[in-house]
Amino acid sequence: MADSNITKRALATALKELMETKSFSKISVSDICEACDMNRKSFYYHFQDKYDLVNWIYYTECVTVLKEKGYHTKWDLLEDLCTYFYTNRSFYRKTLSIDGQNSFSEYFRDIIVTIISSDMEEIFSEDDALPFYVDFYTDAFLCAIKRWLLDKECIPAERFTHLLKNCLPRTSDSILQKFSLESEKQK
């Protein structure tokens, strides 16, 4: 098991180093193997393709670390997640700009769905449109993360999470107030 992780980490390091000078689409499995003196058979023993390697990097560097922390609120989780992305923004700018089957965006979207689903189930438990709400908030969050990281003037993670924390409750409060006022007028 230890040898397996050593091999996986070597492949991950090679991919990250290659991505400093090349776009993800221009990097082949052969390039990754050559950069860490391994053969393609070793690569394919551990990963299906380079997308699988990217997802493994995210899972081992971020998801497993965040799972161990035991957060009191999802805001705390969001802060750590954004800090991780900001710290590794050079790598994730390139991986998040790729869409489609097996992409990191698709993988990350699935993780967001898992996180958001439980909250949406509590809020919309009796609503048959639950999948719509989950998709809506997942897409909004994924789009916000991508836009933030891909911006040339990417603001620090603390500022980004502060803006999210400020925006969501204020927007919700405003909508509720307007809804209440409209309901009062209709009576």
Image (cartoon, rainbow, N blue to C red):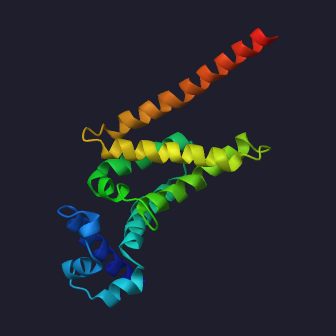
Which of the pair 80/72 is nearer the observer? 80
Quadrant, the N terminus: bottom left
Residue 158 falls in which quadrant of the image? top left
Q: Residue at x 37, y 51 (%)?
A: 84
Classify residue 41 as left or right of residue 171.
Answer: left
Q: Position of residue 183 (x, y in %)?
A: 76, 16
Classify residue 51 as left or right of residue 116.
Answer: left
Q: Residue at x 29, y 79 (%)?
A: 29
Which of the pair 153/81 is nearer the observer? 153
Which of the pair 114/65 is nearer the observer? 114
Classify residue 79 as left or right of residue 26.
Answer: right
Residue 102 in the image: above or below residue 88: below
Q: Residue at x 32, y 81 (%)?
A: 7
Q: Residue furthest left?
A: 21
Q: Position of residue 141 (x, y in %)?
A: 49, 44
Residue 171 in the image: above or below residue 30: above
Quadrant, the C terminus: top right
Classify residue 132 as left or right of residue 100.
Answer: right
Residue 73 falls in which quadrant of the image? top right
Q: Residue at x 51, y 58 (%)?
A: 68
Q: Position of residue 167 (x, y in %)?
A: 49, 28
Residue 109 in the image: above or below residue 146: below
Say how many tags the image has.
Answer: 0
